[in-house]
């Protein structure tokens, strides 16, 4: 081997540690990317997220990686790749979970998916970079937060955790009271609202009112008085005692 070739070979060996990251470094960049991508979910789960999180996180990573001996261009590329990778994984996983949700049980399993994201959020609150960027309120209850978020996404379809069969039936009756109002008359419609639309729970009361308004906005859902009477009778039968 010529002297020139030896110099080139030695130079390549000496340069390689400065140009490639270790597994631990790659894992750390992936972790940072995961926290950045999940931050909006953390906010939906009731945590406080710094409005300048992307920029502050980037500055934190730059400071933390100063000792890695990676050149600036390489580090920037690795950071962008990590965030892009985690973002693609996040989108893929969420879309897969949504596409698989065909039954009521699968839709309600959304809470489990949100719990997984929430655990990432909780981990971020003790991270050297993110502990000042993602904050959990005192007494934070992840289980409750995931349930509440899932409920907000499932309420319109009647699949929230608090929407019992009785509550769903009452919601359907409120919709019928609205859509059938012209056919059954105002007095009977109002009577249904008084009998089945009252509750001390503001969350359930809001659901009943929205159901009535939805029905009232479309008088064509059921076209005949006979059809309205059958639907009302059917939903009355679904309501069990104490399911208010």
Image: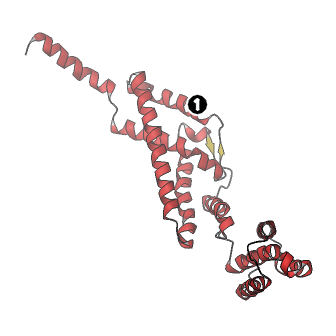
Residue 157 place in picture, x, y as percent: 65, 68
Residue 79 place in picture, x, y as percent: 45, 33
Q: Nearer the viewer, residue 157 or 122?
A: 157
Farthest residue in the left direction?
A: 1
Which corner quadrant holds the C terminus? bottom right
The residue at which mark 1 appears reads as: 55
Residue 123 place in picture, x, y as percent: 53, 48
Which residue is rendered at x = 65% and y = 55% of the image? 140
Q: Nearer the viewer, residue 4 or 107?
A: 107
> Is residue 204 left or right of 143 when viewed as pictured?
right
Which corner quadrant holds the N terminus? top left
Residue 27 place in picture, x, y as percent: 40, 41
Which residue is rendered at x = 69% and y = 73% of the image? 163
Farthest residue in the top direction?
A: 3
Other residues around mark 1 within 10 Å, as few (<14) / some (14–19) / many (≥20): few
> Is residue 31 left or right of 149 when viewed as pictured?
left
> Is residue 135 left or right of 214 when viewed as pictured?
left
109 is higher (above) or lower (below) than 81: below
Q: How is the image coloured?
A: secondary structure
Residue 183 showing in the rendered view:
yes
> Is residue 69 left or right of 162 when viewed as pictured?
left
Which residue is rendered at x = 53% and y = 63% of the image? 112
**Picture quadrant where residue 216 is located:** bottom right
Which residue is rendered at x = 54% and y = 41% of the image? 36
């Amino acid at each position: 081997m010529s002297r020139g070739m030896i110099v080139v070979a030695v130079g390549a060996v000496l340069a390689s540690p400065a140009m490639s990251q270790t597994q631990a470094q790659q894992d750390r960049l992936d972790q940072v990317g995961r926290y950045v991508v999940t931050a909006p979910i953390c906010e939906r789960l009731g945590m406080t997220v710094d409005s300048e999180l992307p920029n502050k996180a980037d500055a934190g990573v730059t400071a933390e990686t100063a000792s890695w001996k990676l050149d600036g261009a390489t580090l920037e590329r690795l950071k962008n790749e990590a965030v892009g990778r985690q973002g693609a994984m996040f989108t893929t996983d969420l879309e897969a979970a949504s596409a698989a949700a065909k039954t009521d049980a699968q839709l309600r399993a959304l809470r489990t998916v949100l719990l997984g994201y929430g655990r990432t959020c909780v981990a971020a609150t003790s991270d050297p970079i993110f502990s000042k960027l993602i904050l959990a309120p005192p007494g934070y209850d992840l289980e409750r937060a995931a349930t509440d978020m899932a409920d907000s996404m499932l309420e319109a379809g009647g699949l929230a955790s608090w929407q019992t069969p009785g509550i769903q039936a009452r919601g359907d009756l409120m919709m019928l009271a609205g859509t059938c109002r012209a056919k059954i008359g105002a007095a009977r419609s109002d009577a249904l609202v008084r009998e089945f639309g009252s509750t001390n729970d503001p969350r359930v009361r809001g659901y009943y009112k929205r159901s009535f308004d939805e029905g009232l906005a479309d008088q064509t859902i059921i076209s005949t008085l006979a059809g309205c009477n059958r639907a009302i009778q059917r939903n009355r039968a679904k309501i069990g005692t104490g399911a208010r």
